[in-house]
């Protein structure tokens, strides 16, 4: 058994259940996909495929629903600054939501976070990634709400320290994103140069030649 408390530097870390870090938890639902009037609104509706495994800050929103769709189905309107966690197919994905949104039934959203939001995001990412790895190769395709909320996570009891830890990882994520964009740009440049500096067909001259090149 792990201790419920341990000390690091001048701060105490506690083990808490995930169910203790937010004031409420909201499931999702899917409005009738045959009713086109439900899908012409302005409320973002996300599904597992809209999230990336290693990106907890960006969601590729593809579908929007109406208020009537929310009222007529199990879908819920979830407030801003919540955390959407995939619990079925795609376990291991989660994302911060900066706007009101709705989800499919494959999600559980953490609402009104009690701790520093950025810190909790990375702590959850770390914990849920481990859960996802443990499920790989098994017939289990998801995690239940009860299992998720009973997960044990470590929380430092100082909000300022939580924020400092969270910011370190946020800076690293920003740096990774910048390097990925730079990599994509250089890859496109390489592809363009390959097309211009090498003949497309035998016997043809390349589109671009260096000065005095024979």
Image: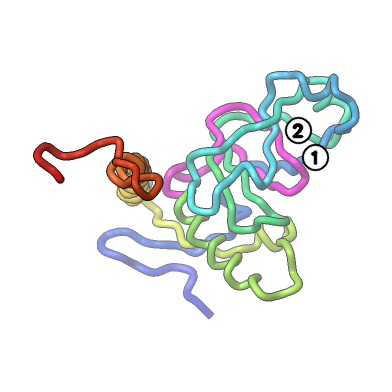
Residue 134, given in percent of the width and then of the height, sits at 61, 73
Q: Is residue 163 visible?
A: no
Residue 150, given in percent of the width and then of the height, sits at 65, 62
Q: Which mark is residue 203?
A: none
The residue pinned by badge 2 equals: 76
Q: Nearer the viewer, mark 1 or mark 2?
A: 1
Does residue 131 appear left or right of residue 139 in this picture?
left
Q: Residue at x 50, y 55 (%)?
A: 125
Q: Is residue 148 visible?
A: yes
Count how many numbered circles sit on residues in the image. Answer: 2
Q: Residue at x 15, y 45 (%)?
A: 214
Q: Residue at x 75, y 43 (%)?
A: 27
> How busy is the neighbourhood of tag 1: few (under 14 within 10 Å), some, or many (20 plus)?
some
- Residue at disc 1, secondary structure: loop
Residue 14, given in percent of the width and then of the height, sits at 45, 62
Does residue 207 appear left or right of residue 98 in this picture?
left
Nearest the camera: 36 or 166? Answer: 36
Does residue 37 appear left or right of residue 42 in this picture?
right
- Residue at disc 2, secondary structure: loop
Determine the residue located farthest toward the front in the rendered image: 203
Q: What's drawn in magenta, residue-wise?
A: 97-120
Quadrant of res 170: top left
The image shows residue 32, relative to residue 85, as above or below, that is above
Nearest the camera: 90 or 214? Answer: 214
Q: Answer whether residue 160 is magenta in the image.
A: no
Q: Which mark is residue 29?
A: 1
Q: Answer whether residue 106 is magenta in the image.
A: yes
Q: Are marks 1 and 2 in contact (CB under 8 Å)?
A: yes
């Amino acid at each position: 058994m792990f201790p419920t408390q341990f000390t690091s530097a001048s701060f105490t870390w506690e083990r808490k259940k995930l169910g203790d870090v937010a004031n409420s938890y909201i499931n999702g639902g899917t409005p009738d996909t045959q009713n086109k009037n439900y899908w012409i609104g302005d409320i973002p509706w996300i599904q597992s495929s809209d999230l990336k495994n290693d990106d907890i800050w960006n969601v590729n929103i593809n579908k929007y629903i109406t208020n009537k769709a929310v009222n007529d189905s199990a879908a819920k309107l979830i407030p801003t600054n919540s955390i959407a966690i995939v619990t079925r197919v795609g376990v291991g994905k989660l994302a911060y939501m900066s706007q009101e949104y709705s989800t499919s039934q494959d999600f559980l959203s953490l609402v009104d976070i009690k701790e520093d939001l950025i810190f909790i995001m990375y702590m959850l990412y770390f914990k849920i990634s481990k859960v996802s790895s443990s499920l790989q190769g098994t017939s289990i395709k998801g995690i239940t709400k009860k299992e998720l909320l009973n997960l044990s996570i470590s929380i430092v009891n100082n909000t300022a320290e939580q924020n400092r830890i969270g910011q370190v990882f946020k800076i690293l994520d920003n740096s990774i994103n910048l390097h990925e964009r730079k990599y994509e740009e250089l890859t496109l440049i390489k592809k363009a140069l390959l097309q211009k500096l090498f003949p497309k067909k035998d016997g043809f001259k390349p589109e671009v030649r260096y000065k005095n090149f024979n």
